[in-house]
């Protein structure tokens, strides 16, 4: 099992460019992806932006959202607010980023992300896509 940041999930469901290919390879190697519930809100925000820019239509966005739900399945996890706050303050991350880090720490698994701040804050826990 691995925790994935929203940016990794976006690349997988959209299949965009080399990062999409790397996300697909990552998923093929370990399909047990986990993420905090926040990831779905962030994904929906990205999909809305893609629709507004004319890159995809609303049906594509809906299908990508459904794909993300299928990928994460029952592994959409709640993270304790206190833990998120402590992590954010200790590592100087946003609370959003700290949710992913806190979940990976709690599960004692790798966090895969394209977020530079996370990669710099927890190099032993996070890996770039």
Image (cartoon, rainbow, N blue to C red):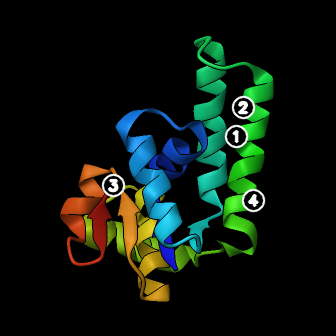
Q: Which residue is mark 4?
A: 70
Q: Which residue is mark 1?
A: 64
Instruction: Report which quarter residue 20 is drawn in.
Output: top left
Measured Cα–Cα span from mark 2 to mark 4: 14 Å
82 to the left or right of 87: right
Query: Which of marks 1 and 4 precedes in the sequence?
Result: 1
Circle 1 packing at 10 Å, graded few (<14), some (14-19), many (20+), is: many
Residue visible at 44% across and 70% down in the picture: 85
Residue visible at 38% across and 76% down in the picture: 110
108 to the left or right of 14: left
Q: Secondary structure at mark 3?
A: loop
Residue 129, numbered label:
3
Measured Cα–Cα span from mark 4 to mark 1: 10 Å
Q: Which residue is mark 2?
A: 61
Circle 4 packing at 10 Å, graded few (<14), some (14-19), many (20+), is: few
92 is higher (above) or lower (below) than 90 = above
Query: Which of marks 1 and 3 precedes in the sequence?
Result: 1
Q: Secondary structure at mark 2?
A: helix
Residue 44, numbered label:
none
Q: Secondary structure at mark 1?
A: helix
Q: Secondary structure at mark 4?
A: helix
Measured Cα–Cα span from mark 2 to mark 1: 5 Å
Whether residues under marks 2 and 1 lie with C-beta atoms below 8 angstroms apart, the answer is yes
**Spot occupied by residue 126 in the image (x, y as percentages of width and height):** 30, 69
Residue visible at 73% across and 18% down in the picture: 57
């Amino acid at each position: 099992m691995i925790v994935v940041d929203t940016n990794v999930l976006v690349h997988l469901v959209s299949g965009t460019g080399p990062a999409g290919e790397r996300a697909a390879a990552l998923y093929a190697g370990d399909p047990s992806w986990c993420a905090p519930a926040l990831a779905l809100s962030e994904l929906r925000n990205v999909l809305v932006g893609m629709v507004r820019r004319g890159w995809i239509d609303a049906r594509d966005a809906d299908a990508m959202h459904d794909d993300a739900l299928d990928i994460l399945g029952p592994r959409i996890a709640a993270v304790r607010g206190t833990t998120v706050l402590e992590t954010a303050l200790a590592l100087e991350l946003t609370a959003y980023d700290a949710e992913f880090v806190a979940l990976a720490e709690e599960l004692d698994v790798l966090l895969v992300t394209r977020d530079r701040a996370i990669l710099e804050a927890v190099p032993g826990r996070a890996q770039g896509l």
